Image (cartoon, rainbow, N blue to C red):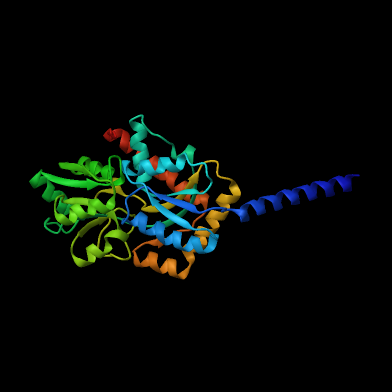
């Protein structure tokens, strides 16, 4: 009898495992949307489209990118937090932490990163660069700070209230004792256009979407926010090297699914994203963009996001960064 019961239990477990495997293999059953919460043309958009092309080939369904800009990335993120179709993903970047923290501080957060999203995997690690218009007589961040102290009438741009560059700008003002007026934009692409035109003097962008402008001399990098110098621009010092450790930030871009997404689907997504990150064509293109391919585990990616939230929440509160 015991042997029979054990056999039955074993058979039941085997059938359950087979059912999970079938559910995992059956997904997706329709086209998959990747929501990018910024306008087209920025680094996050470029990377999302690169992954979408490869995932279309491996998932057996069309994977399309949909841009939902505004609110420093919070509008598009909220669309995903409320998605119930099982085929909608979010591809966000490090500004997810700062914007959400600012909305939480203001008491108007429409979602919680920890509660409403399931981290899947990092798509790429892209250094965030601090940039100036070439008309600004500064070759690094220390020289820009000295110039700002003399002028007192400079403008910096960000991808929206509560965004990463908004936080960086306010921390820099605090630590350096300078005045900079904030001009928010709906994403990196319009910010860079205004910086190129000289209507703002200072801003930031992920290296991938600013590299061509840097190499042409249209924009000048004064620091990287990463812990190490960017391999594509080894001559540009880090913010920490220049005496500003408080603005050091990991430049991640990554995939999230709505909370409650079945574990087998999350597992397959992570596996497919990791494989895409290592595909020669994808990895080469990411390297050309001055970035590092991702593909880490959901636990590793989730831990990195959690650590960044712990870093930025106290800064947002200290600086009283209300999102209007």
Tell me which residue sits at (45%, 59%) in the image: 52
Residue 148 location in percent, x, y?
A: 13, 47
The picture places residue 116, in percent across and down from the top left corner, at 48, 39
Depth check: give the residue in front, 237 or 8.
8
Instruction: Tell which of 19 and 215 is nearer to you.
Output: 19
Q: Residue at x 31, y 37 (%)?
A: 316
Classify residue 139 by image quadrant: bottom left
In this rendered view, identify the residue nearer to me: 81 or 204. 81
Most foreground residue, 247 or 11: 11
Q: Position of residue 157 (x, y in %)?
A: 21, 47
At a point 33% along the width and 58% down the height, the residue shown is 228
Q: Residue at x 33, y 65 (%)?
A: 231
Indicate left or right for 269 with 188 as reference: right
In the rendered image, residue 92, in percent from the top left (x then y), is placed at 40, 49
Residue at the top extreme of this rendering: 107
Q: Residue furthest front?
A: 30
Residue at the right extreme, as displayed = 1
Q: How many marks?
A: 0
254 in relation to 100, above or below: below
Residue 229 in sight in this render: no
Residue 294 appears in the rendering: yes
Q: Viewed as shown, does residue 291 lie left or right of 81?
A: left
Residue 301 appears left or right of 232:
right
Side of 277 relative to 324 (left or right):
right
Q: Tell me the quarter of the image containing the C terminus.
A: top left
Quadrant that contains the N terminus: top right
Give the vertical position of 115 relative to 10 (above or below).
above
């Amino acid at each position: 009898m015991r042997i029979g019961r054990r056999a039955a239990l074993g058979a039941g477990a085997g059938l359950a495992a087979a059912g999970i495997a079938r559910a995992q293999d059956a997904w997706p059953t329709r086209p998959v949307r990747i929501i990018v919460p910024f306008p087209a043309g920025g680094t996050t958009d470029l990377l999302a489209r690169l992954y979408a092309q490869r995932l279309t080939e491996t998932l057996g369904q069309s994977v399309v990118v949909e841009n939902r800009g505004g609110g420093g990335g919070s509008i598009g993120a909220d669309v995903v937090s409320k998605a119930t179709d099982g085929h909608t993903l979010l591809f966000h970047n490090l500004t997810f932490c700062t914007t959400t923290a600012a909305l939480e501080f203001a008491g108007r957060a429409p979602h919680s990163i920890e509660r409403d999203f399931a981290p899947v995997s990092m798509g790429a690690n892209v250094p965030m660069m601090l940039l100036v218009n070439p008309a600004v007589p500064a070759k690094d961040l220390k020289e820009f700070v000295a110039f700002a102290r003399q002028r007192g009438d400079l403008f910096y741009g960000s991808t929206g209230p509560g965004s990463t560059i908004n936080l960086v700008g306010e921390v820099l003002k605090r630590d350096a004792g300078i005045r900079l007026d904030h001009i928010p934009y709906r994403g990196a692409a319009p910010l860079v256009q205004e910086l190129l035109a000289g209507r703002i003097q200072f801003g930031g962008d992920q290296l991938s979407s600013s590299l061509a402008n840097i190499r042409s001399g249209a924009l000048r990098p004064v620091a990287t926010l990463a812990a190490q110098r960017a391999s594509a621009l080894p001559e540009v010092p880090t913010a920490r090297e220049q005496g500003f450790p408080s603005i050091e930030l990991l430049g991640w871009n990554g995939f999230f699914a709505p909370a409650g997404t079945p574990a087998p689907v999350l597992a397959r997504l992570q596996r497919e994203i990791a494989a895409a990150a290592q595909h020669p064509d994808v990895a080469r293109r990411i390297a050309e963009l001055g970035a590092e391919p991702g593909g880490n585990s959901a636990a590793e990616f989730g831990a990195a996001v959690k650590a960044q939230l712990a870093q930025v929440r106290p800064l947002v509160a200290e600086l009283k960064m209300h999102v209007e």
